């Protein structure tokens, strides 16, 4: 041994002397000795192909007491001799330095070379390794490889991805692209104009004061153009510009909140409307309606005719908005004359008379006169005065 070795803290084990004779390809040899503490050790050959011979030289019990296990007669006298015999046998299995230099002359430069066993390991490793320049093309089972590294979902997504040779409006998908409104059939940004656009403009537009601050859109198809816009008074305008030059324009007026319209159907009253039956409402629920009817009650128009408020014309003065006026007719007058026995009587206006001479001689007072008045004999009568009419439901927009 090249130096002394002190073994401490060993318990329940054995101490072995490990001998080997090791050299290199130029026949530089030396004896290598290791002291090894293990429970059991047998002769073996290491990975480089060198035989190792081991001898138990001591045993250590659980208290740390050492027992000499060397065979009597001394390890130096007996076993070392056997070791030298084995080593001589090993030497004969390797070439001498002179023979090696002669054999390698002109073939390989002088240097350090691996043993056959080491080369075998290297060869096996090389056979199972992947070539860098193949970039994974030499993987035997690519599907299993993808699965092992957890990229199955990624591969599936990539297979379903849009290929980069596809295009959108002539723009390749191989890099980031910028899509404009026209690329996807959408309208571009609003165009500001001094007047309403003509038939050849399509898209949103905005006009100034001379066109009522119109904000709208123009849609051109097949030479014809349709336009719709809203003015500053929130009125909806529609216009159609025909390819033949004809122009039609309308103003679509909606029913304002608080306005009453007639409903001529037994179908449900539309949402946002209520019948004029005098019901109360809450300002919190109908804030705009409360501005129209501050008393928070809808009109009650059941069974009533409508008459326009006079507003200074003089036909129905003295009326307030929403007041109910009872029924009435214009006065019917007439008069009855004083009858005489000889010549009958007279009547005017709504009255008439009939004279029938009696059977007596003149001056004998035998005539009879009677008067009647019954309007139903002439016109339809009822308990009220009314024109020809039709029943409807009056409804008011509440929202």
Image (cartoon, rainbow, N blue to C red):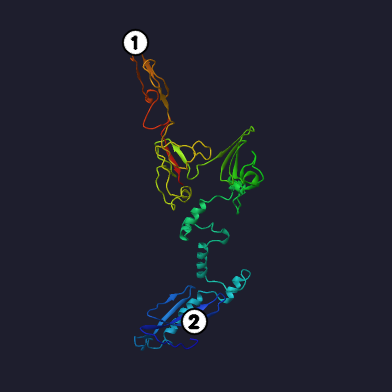
Q: Which mark is residue 49?
A: none
Provide residue 164's location: percent of width, then percent of height.
58, 50
Residue at the extreme front of the image, as rendered:
363
Q: Which residue is mark 1?
A: 361
Question: Element at badge 2?
Answer: strand
Q: Residue at x 39, y 22 (%)?
A: 338
The residue labelled by disc 2 is 32
The crowding category of the residue bearing disc 2, from other C-alpha atoms within 10 Å (few below 14, some 14 to 19, many at least 20), is: few
The foreground one among 228 and 67 is 228
Q: Is residue 216 left or right of residue 393?
A: right
Determine the residue located farthest toward the right in the rendered image. 194
Distance Cα–Cα, label 1 vs label 2? 189 Å
- 345 w.r.t. 101: above or below: above
Relative to 255, residue 366 above or below: above
Give the quarter of the image for residue 374.
top left
Q: Is residue 355 above or below residue 302?
A: above
Is residue 141 in sight in this rendering?
no
**Crowding near the residue tagged with mark 1, few <14, some 14–19, many ≥20 C-alpha atoms within 10 Å:** few
Q: Residue at x 42, y 80 (%)?
A: 54
Viewer-side residue, 66 vs 248: 248
Q: Nearer the viewer, residue 129 or 98?
A: 129
Query: Residue 386 appears at what percent x and percent y?
Result: 41, 31
- Sequence order check: which comes first, mark 1 or mark 2? 2
Task: Report x, y in % for residue 109.
Answer: 62, 71
Q: In this rendering, which labeled residue sits more in front, label 1 or label 2? A: 1
């Amino acid at each position: 041994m090249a130096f002394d070795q002190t073994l401490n803290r060993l318990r329940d084990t054995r101490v072995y002397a490990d001998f080997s004779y090791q050299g290199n390809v130029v026949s530089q040899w030396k004896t290598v000795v290791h002291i090894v503490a293990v429970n059991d050790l047998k002769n073996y050959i290491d990975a480089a192909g060198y035989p190792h011979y081991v001898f138990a030289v001591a045993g250590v019990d659980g208290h740390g007491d050492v027992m000499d296990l060397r065979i009597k007669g001394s390890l130096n006298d007996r076993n070392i001799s056997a070791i030298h015999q084995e080593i001589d046998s090993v030497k004969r299995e390797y070439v001498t330095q002179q023979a090696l230099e002669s054999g390698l002359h002109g073939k390989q430069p002088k240097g350090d070379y691996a043993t056959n066993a080491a080369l075998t390991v290297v060869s096996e490793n090389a056979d199972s390794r992947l070539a860098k320049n193949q970039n994974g093309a030499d993987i035997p089972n690519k599907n299993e490889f993808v699965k092992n590294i957890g990229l199955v979902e990624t591969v599936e997504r990539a297979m379903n991805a849009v290929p980069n040779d596809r295009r959108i409006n002539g723009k390749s998908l191989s890099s980031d692209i910028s899509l404009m409104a026209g690329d996807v059939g959408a309208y571009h940004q609003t165009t500001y104009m001094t007047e309403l656009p003509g038939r050849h403009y399509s898209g949103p537009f905005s006009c100034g004061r001379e066109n009522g601050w119109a904000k709208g859109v123009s849609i051109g198809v097949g030479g014809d153009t349709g336009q719709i816009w809203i003015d500053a008074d929130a009125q909806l305008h529609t216009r159609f510009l025909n390819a033949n030059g004809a122009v039609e324009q309308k103003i679509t007026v909606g029913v304002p909140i608080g306005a009453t319209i007639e409903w001529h159907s037994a179908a449900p009253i539309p949402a946002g409307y209520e019948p004029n039956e005098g019901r109360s409402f809450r300002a919190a629920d109908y804030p705009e309606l409360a501005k129209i009817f501050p008393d928070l009650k809808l009109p009650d128009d059941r069974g009533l005719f409508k008459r326009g408020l006079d507003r200074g014309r003089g036909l129905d003065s003295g009326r307030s908005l929403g007041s109910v006026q009872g029924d009435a007719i214009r006065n019917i007058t007439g008069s009855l004359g004083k009858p005489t026995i000889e010549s009958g009587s007279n009547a005017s206006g709504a009255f008439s008379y009939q004279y029938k001479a009696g059977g007596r001689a003149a001056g004998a007072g035998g005539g009879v006169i009677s008067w009647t008045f019954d309007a139903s004999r002439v016109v339809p009568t009822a308990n009220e005065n009314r024109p020809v009419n039709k029943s409807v439901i009056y409804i008011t927009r509440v929202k």
